């Protein structure tokens, strides 16, 4: 049994930063990780997918090169090389983190799966770690949980009889799937679907709730049209059964029929890893296993702090990392955090705050400023005219309540609105700021100077305005 000042369970985003800070303060900390340091994001999430996306974007640009007067000849994707580049990058980043964890004075890195026996008094929590060498028991008065989530596998008859993939197994393939069937039309399904199509796979997305189901209907439609134009098949429905079909898989979708492919990826949401902590944590959780916390991440067990995806306060690397930062800088709290995020399709979708539907449901006096990307000069100059910029404003309070930007650089552009919302400035501040020309963001003043009522959801869709004057004419 070894006693520590603090034990961190899970070396994802928030855990290591807390451990490094504590060690820097002279505390003795154990970091317990059952897989690899860096968690989902580094090993099979954001980073490898965005590195792989870079190859898909290059392939797409190369195919379009002649439009720009650049002639590159036949475009051939070597998937082995593309994924090899990803693994080299990720291996380097992981090795660097591992080195820091192994060599920082005050940190003991323990590779193994931890269960927690929480002390309701908060004095002597027990962390039992199953390692390759056997069991270790660590005790402490301060536990940081950062255990994240894993793919939620839906109940589909026969799924367990086929070698289905989650993002982990998909990223481990070194050869391109001939036909990738994706169950789920959310972030993971759409990001991977577009990439693999651009690499040359046939791709079918079986979208239970539609694609990008949480977004405004016109945004869903633009994405659906874009994907279909790239040769991706989207079908609506939920599989009822899955079986082997020769060397591939056959997925039965009621009302659609049989979808056959060489590989099937399951991307239907995430589930909390808190079940892996064992039955004696004493933690209050919601019905989905996300730990209930106060605004400084304190759980129902004194001295046990829950950071990252597992607390249900965010589902992104930046929210997880910031949880650690907020915890380390009292009296900061998570209250009032404005969560900005992006889906890295190409072009990407940037989001903050409410969708149009949520704005309608609020009952507040909300108007929108919007422009089609086809009217944004920077997008036109780069022949990247797919998408829309939309900002929602409460015209009574002048508060910005949301933005949806689908289009060129939207992952960065949306952060202008995110910062304005976090600062609580009225929309007129953004409207009257001086933007740089020619950028996508320069259209915020234009659209905020021409707010209009929200569309009637029951009205027939109208064509987007063909041209709106740009700030520089
Ligand atoms: C394919 C994919 C793409 C994504 N892309 C993006 C993106 O572009 N941008 C973005 O912001 N987010 C993205 N995400 C989400 C992002 O990866 C997560 O939100 C983020 O990793 C959450 O961090 P975390 O620290 O809370 O948990 P995790 O990163 O999941 O870390 C939890 C760690 O805890 C360990 N662990 C769990 N239980 C135990 C236990 N009992 N004992 C020991 N160790 C344990 C796990 O092995 C893991 O290493 C993506 C996710 C996926 C799957
Ligand atoms: N760019 C990013 O930040 C990024 C990228 C990838 C993943 N992520 C994170 O990972 C999380 C998980 O991504 P995800 O795509 O798995 O989940 P998701 O919640 O975004 O989408 C899952 C989709 O699957 C559908 N679905 C559920 N069950 C189904 C079934 N049986 N058959 C068919 N469809 C079904 C749902 O209707 C939903 O539309 C995201 O919510 C996000 O937090 C973030």
Image: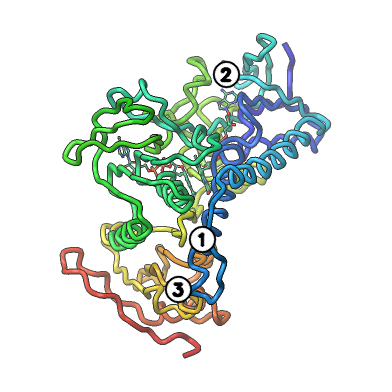
Q: Judge depth for marks 2 and 1 and give the one in front.
A: 1
Q: Which residue is mark 1?
A: 411
Q: Residues within 10 Å of mark 2 (few under 14, many from 20)?
A: many
Residue that appears at 29% across and 64% down: 364
Cα separation between marks 3 and 1: 20 Å
Residue labelled with disc 3: 427
Disc 1: CA contacts within 10 A as few (<14), some (14-19) or many (>=20):
many
Q: Position of residue 47 (x, y in %)?
A: 59, 46
The answer, for residue 418, to whether it is visible in the render is yes
In-image side of 388 versus 59 (left or right): left
Asked if residue 196 lies left or right of residue 465, the reply is: right
Of 231 and 220, which appears nearest the observer? 231
Q: Which residue is mark 2?
A: 116
Q: Residue at x 30, y 42 (%)?
A: 206
Instruction: Assess whether mark 1 and mark 2 are in contact (beta carbons under 8 angstroms).
Output: no
- Ligand 2's quadrant is top left
Residue under the point 41% across and 36% down: 265
Q: CA distance from mark 2 to mark 1?
A: 38 Å
Residue 302 versus residue 398 in the image, above or below: above
Against 73, residue 190 (above or below) is: above
Earlier in the chain: of badge 2 and badge 1, it is 2
Q: Position of residue 264 (x, y in %)?
A: 38, 35
Q: Residue pushed farthest top?
A: 134
Percent from the top left, x then y, of residue 125? 62, 18
Mark 3 and mark 1 in contact? Answer it, CB < 8 Å. Answer: no
Task: Write the residue at 61% across / 24% down.
Answer: 34
Q: Residue furthest bottom?
A: 473
């Amino acid at each position: 049994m070894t006693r520590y000042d603090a034990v961190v369970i899970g070396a994802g985003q928030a855990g290591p930063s807390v451990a490094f800070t504590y060690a820097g303060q002279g505390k003795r900390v154990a970091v317990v990780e059952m897989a690899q340091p860096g968690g989902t994001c580094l090993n099979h999430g954001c980073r490898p997918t965005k590195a792989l996306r870079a190859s898909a974007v290059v392939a797409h640009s190369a195919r379009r090169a002649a439009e720009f007067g650049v002639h590159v000849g036949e475009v051939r994707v070597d998937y082995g090389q593309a994924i090899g580049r990803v693994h080299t990058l990720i291996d380097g980043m992981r090795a660097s983190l591992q080195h820091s964890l192994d060599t920082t004075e005050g940190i003991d890195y323990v590779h193994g799966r931890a269960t927690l026996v929480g002390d309701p008094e908060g004095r002597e929590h027990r962390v039992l770690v199953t390692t390759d060498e056997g069991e270790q028991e660590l005790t402490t008065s301060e536990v940081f949980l950062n255990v994240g989530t894993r793919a939620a596998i839906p109940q589909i008859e026969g799924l367990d009889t086929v070698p289905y993939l989650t993002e982990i197994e998909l990223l481990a393939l070194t050869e391109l799937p001939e036909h990738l069937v994706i169950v789920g039309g959310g972030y993971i399904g759409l990001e991977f679907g577009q990439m693999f199509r651009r690499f040359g796979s046939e791709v079918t997305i079986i979208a239970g709730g539609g694609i990008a189901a949480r977004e405004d209907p016109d945004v869903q439609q633009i994405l659906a049209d874009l994907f279909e134009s790239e040769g991706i098949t989207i079908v609506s429905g939920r599989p009822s059964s899955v079986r082997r079909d020769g060397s591939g898989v056959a997925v039965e979708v009621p009302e659609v029929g049989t979808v056959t492919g060489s590989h099937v990826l399951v991307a239907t949401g995430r589930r909390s890893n808190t079940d892996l902590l064992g039955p004696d944590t004493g933690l209050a959780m919601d019905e989905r296993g996300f730990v209930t916390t106060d605004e400084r991440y304190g759980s129902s067990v004194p001295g046990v702090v829950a950071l990252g995806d597992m607390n249900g306060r965010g589902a992104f690397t930046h929210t997880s990392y910031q949880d650690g930062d907020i915890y380390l800088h009292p009296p900061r709290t998570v209250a009032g955090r404005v969560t900005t995020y992006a889906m890295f399709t190409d072009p990407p979708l940037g989001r903050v705050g409410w969708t149009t539907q949520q704005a309608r449901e609020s009952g507040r006096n909300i108007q929108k400023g919007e422009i089609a990307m086809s009217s944004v000069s920077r997008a036109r100059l780069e022949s990247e005219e797919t998408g829309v910029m939309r900002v929602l404003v409460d015209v009574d309070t002048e508060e910005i309540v949301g933005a949806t930007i689908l289009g060129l650089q939207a992952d960065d552009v949306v952060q202008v609105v995110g910062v304005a919302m976090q600062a609580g400035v009225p929309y007129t501040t953004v409207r009257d700021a001086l933007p740089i020309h020619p950028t996508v963001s320069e259209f915020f003043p234009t659209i905020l100077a021409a707010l209009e009522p929200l569309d009637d959801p029951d009205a027939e869709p109208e064509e987007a305005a063909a041209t709106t004057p740009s700030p520089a004419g």
